[in-house]
Image (tube, helix red, strand yellow):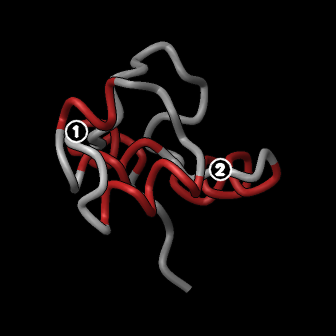
Amino acid sequence: MTECNIDKLKKTCACTYSSCSRLGKCCECIEYHLKMNELPGCVFAKISKDAERSYNRSFEYFAKLVLGKLKA
């Protein structure tokens, strides 16, 4: 099993919530957001920086962005 390189992941993480205790800890971040019925910020950052900065992590918002129903 590969170990996470948290220092490297912190540098490349697309999430703008820099005070998050899970920054660079992808497994913890994904687990946390899925428990909250949402997606992590990095998923939204792949669409646009504005989408990530909205802090709307809902599946519905993501789907609308992907389907082009919203502009990020």
Disc 1 versus disc 2: nearer the observer: 1
Image position of 9 with respect to 50: above or below: below
Residue 54, image x, y percentages: 38, 25
The kind of residue tagged 2 is Glu
Q: How many marks?
A: 2
Q: Which residue is mark 1?
A: 72
Q: Nearer the viewer, residue 32 or 65?
A: 65
Residue neighbourhood size for the residue with mark 1, other residues' Cα within 10 Å, grouped as few (<14), some (14–19), many (≥20) = some
Q: Which residue is mark 2?
A: 38
Tell me if 21 is positioned left or right of 66 in this view: right
> Separation of disc 1 and disc 2 at Cα?
17 Å
Q: Residue at 50%, 69% (x, y): give it.
A: 3
Residue 15, image x, y percentages: 35, 34
Secondary-structure class at tag 1: loop
Q: Spot the residue most to the front.
A: 69
The kind of residue tagged 1 is Ala
Tell me if 16 is positioned left or right of 63 in this view: left
Residue 49, image x, y percentages: 18, 35
Residue 18, image x, y percentages: 40, 18
